[in-house]
Image (cartoon, rainbow, N blue to C red):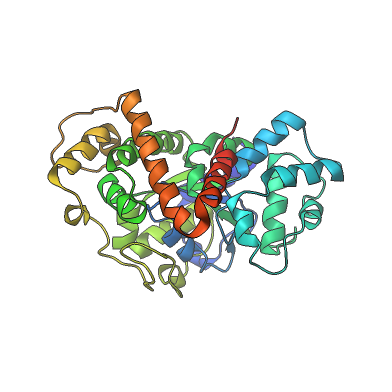
Amino acid sequence: MNSCGDHLQGVVDSGADLNAGAGTDWHGPLFIVGMPRSGTKLLRGLLCQHERIRVLPAETEFLPALAAWIERHGAPERAAAFSSLYLAIHSAPYFAYRKAQEPQFDWRQWRAQCAGRFDVGGLFEGFARYELGLDRNSEAIWADKSPAYIRHLPLLLDGFPCARIIHIVRDVRDYCASNRRTWGKDVRRAADRWAADVMRAHRQCAATPSRCVELRYEDLLQDPRGQMYRLCRFLGVAYSRTLTQLKRPVEPCGATAARIGIARDNFNTYGKYLAPGEILAIESLAWETMQALGYEPRVARCQQRLRMPQRQLLQLKDALQLLSADARHKGWAGALRFHASHLRMLARR
């Protein structure tokens, strides 16, 4: 185990009261991952209250494309190569967000912050420090909240030897209901993807407990103090009461949209939105992963799986639904460009 992992495991095992003063020798990165609509925005909002934790203002989601570019072209040590790298990823949704912010993004300043390191870890750290305004002597922990990185945990662990990962999980039934209410997605495909991605991340967390921790959304809602204290121990930082309070809304849509504070009753609500047959289908498709994560199926008794033709058909159905929704304000061409770029940024190869 590397020295970063040794330090953290000692903190976790000691059970020491970190309120009295925490170590400052770990400065990130911290990655917050999980399925969309699983509480990542809430967790980000709470962690941002900590004086030492600084989270990037929007989901990056271009890290897999960054790694793929380096695999094909090598490290972009020269300015011309760095410019080519930026051109290859600048269509990522993150940079669409940045276009509306001041000052304008400058890849030259990003390059300067890399401090001569042009591997995946050095490039992304340079990017984060540039965006967050953190110099190399800062005691702040830099962090990224990109739910889609749940499918890229090996990349995070290999590319960032000191990385810590928080995987937040939500009950698959509430997750599927929220996905349909927010984006109109099919609950069967949502359950199928939840089962595969959450199980993979769960196994990774179990295999690397000194670097990954798992958090249930429902536990965070019901016991924010206990869960945030647990995360502080994991990260080796002092606990503060401010970590259970939100200063502003973090959710733009859904049942907690524009709400300030933790909605402690926002769980086990799927019965209001799902028909009995839909609950059965969801639990059947996610049965094994529910068991592994401690979620009790109500009606299903065994695992079922989607066959490939059905999975592909549901994928097409969801894609058309998303494109149709986005086309209302982006136009069909704009919606196609946006989603094509999003998929390309998350494709490792």
Residue at 46%, 40% (x, y): give it.
Answer: 209
User: In x, y percent, where is residue 53?
Assistant: 57, 62
Q: In the rendered image of this protein, does residue 301 appear above or below residue 140?
A: above
Image coords of residue 113 (percent x, y): 78, 54
Q: Is residue 93 above or below residue 193?
A: below
Residue 347: give x, y in percent of width and height.
Answer: 56, 35
Side of 313 where 2 appears, left or right: right
The relative height of residue 162 versus residue 70 in the rendered view (above or below) is below
**Residue in front for this viewpoint, 9 or 133:** 133
Q: Is residue 7 left or right of residue 130?
A: left
Q: Which quarter of the figure has residue 21? A: bottom right
- Residue found at x 31% / y 50%: 180
Residue at x 51% of width, y 69% of height: 49
Query: Which residue is outermost to the front?
Result: 332
Residue shown at 54% from the left, 56% from the top: 236
Q: Quadrant of the C terminus?
A: top right
| Number of numbered markers | 0
Is residue 104 shown above or below 346? below
Q: Is residue 127 left or right of residue 218?
A: right
* Residue placed most toward the observer, 91 or 79: 91
In terms of depth relative to the viewer, which is nearer, 227 or 249? Answer: 249
Q: Quadrant of residue 269?
A: bottom left
Does residue 63 appear anywhere in the picture? yes
Q: Where the N terminus falls, by quadrant?
A: top right
Looking at the picture, how far across and down is residue 31, in whole percent?
54, 49
Residue 16 in view: no
